[in-house]
Image: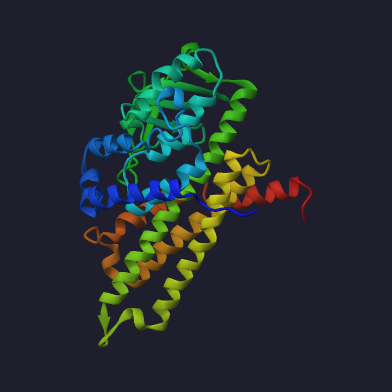
């Protein structure tokens, strides 16, 4: 299979990069992490104006009606820039759930929320039964929550939340207490099983895409530091050991990229192996990002541990997202299970 992004997809990424290069500098990220929300409402509005937030929203709800292949480069760019806004949770995860769930009142929920998401007027957080805390719960207007095999759409005002700390200052997780009701039910039974399985696959792929960008930024920052830092009268980037560290990190990233892109394509096209591809994507991308973080620490030395240095912003995101929606060992086990279940050896 030959796969390549088209001119429109590449141009969309370029436009997002131009926005983030201007308005999502390390200083902007620090300001966002220190704020009450953890992200910038003005930058969220700018993303909506560009069409980024409505990319997966159907056209009849004022969105672009596009798929994950169109979104994957933007998620990668979000990781590269350190974008603190909840693009992954809202656009890659929540919108498809609201779009596809067919429970009672589903059409009314779509009419209420999808257009608001595309306009930048609503933020959605997503939590499953396996999560001790829901990332972004405190900053969301709507929460999609699982309990007892059912999926519910619960307005934030109807929940009680206890904030929990996170390495990544933008994620703002919280334990959420809430009561299910017929009015909040999105999906149950077999419908819920299918929706939750698709959600898990999209989350693995989407988180993997962000991790690609995180790894890319860590490698770029570390390579620049290796050129600037001088020891024994020479830039440390001229030392063979440093070159090897950077090369190995880049190799891991280049192996992970096609796996993530393939996963996005598989999910868009209903490939029967889409779940396996999603797990492969998350495992490889998590390895690439955590490996890049480890390499960045080794090359930067003691300064890499300090909050004063910008590299820590991306290292924290790498560690946080690598564990989100299943870590690398979990997804490798799932890949093995699916291969053996299909009669492989």
Q: Position of residue 211 (x, y in %)?
A: 44, 52
Q: Toward the viewer: 130 or 295? A: 295
The quadrant in which residue 303 appears is bottom left
Question: Is residue 273 found left or right of 140 in the rendered image?
Answer: right
Q: Toward the viewer: 220 or 21? A: 21
Question: Is residue 117 found left or right of 129 in the rendered image?
Answer: left
Residue under the image location 53 percent in, 51 percent down: 260
Q: Toward the viewer: 193 or 22? A: 22
Residue under the image location 46 percent in, 37 percent down: 92
Residue 207, placed above or below residue 239? above
Colouring method of the image: rainbow
Q: Position of residue 203 (x, y in %)?
A: 50, 41
Q: Toward the viewer: 209 or 239? A: 209
Q: Position of residue 306 (x, y in %)?
A: 25, 61
The quadrant in which residue 112 appears is top left
Residue 52, placed above or below residue 105? below
Q: Position of residue 12 (x, y in %)?
A: 39, 46
């Amino acid at each position: 299979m030959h796969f390549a992004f088209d001119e429109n997809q590449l141009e969309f990424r370029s436009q997002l990069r131009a926005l983030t290069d201007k308005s999502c500098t390390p200083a902007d990220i620090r300001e966002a992490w220190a704020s009450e929300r953890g992200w910038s409402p003005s930058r969220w509005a700018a993303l909506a104006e560009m069409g980024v937030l409505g990319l997966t929203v159907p056209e009849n709800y004022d969105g672009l009606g596009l798929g994950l292949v169109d979104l994957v480069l933007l998620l990668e760019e979000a990781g590269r820039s350190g974008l603190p806004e909840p693009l992954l949770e809202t656009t890659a995860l929540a919108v498809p759930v609201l779009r596809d769930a067919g429970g009672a009142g589903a059409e009314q929920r779509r009419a209420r929320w999808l257009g608001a998401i595309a306009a930048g007027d609503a933020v959605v957080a997503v939590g499953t039964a396996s999560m001790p805390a829901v990332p972004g719960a405190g900053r969301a207007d709507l929460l999609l929550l699982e309990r007892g095999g059912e999926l519910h759409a619960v307005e934030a005002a109807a929940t009680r939340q206890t904030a929990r700390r996170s390495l990544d200052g933008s994620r703002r997780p919280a334990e959420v207490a809430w009561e299910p009701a017929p009015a909040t039910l999105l999906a149950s039974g077999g419908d819920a099983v299918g929706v939750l399985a698709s959600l898990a696959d999209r989350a693995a792929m989407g988180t993997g895409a962000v991790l690609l960008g995180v790894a890319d930024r860590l490698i770029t920052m570390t390579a620049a530091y290796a050129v600037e830092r001088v020891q024994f009268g020479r830039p440390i980037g001229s030392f063979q050991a440093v070159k090897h560290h950077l090369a190995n990190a880049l190799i891991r990233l280049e192996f992970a990229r096609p796996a993530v892109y393939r996963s996005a394509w598989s999910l868009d096209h209903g490939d029967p192996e889409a779940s396996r591809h999603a797990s492969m994507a998350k495992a490889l991308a998590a390895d690439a990002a955590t490996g890049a973080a480890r390499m960045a620490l080794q090359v930067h030395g003691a300064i890499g541990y300090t909050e004063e240095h910008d590299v820590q912003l991306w290292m924290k995101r790498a560690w946080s997202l690598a564990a989100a929606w299943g870590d690398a060992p979990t997804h490798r086990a799932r890949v093995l299970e699916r291969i053996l279940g299909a009669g492989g050896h």
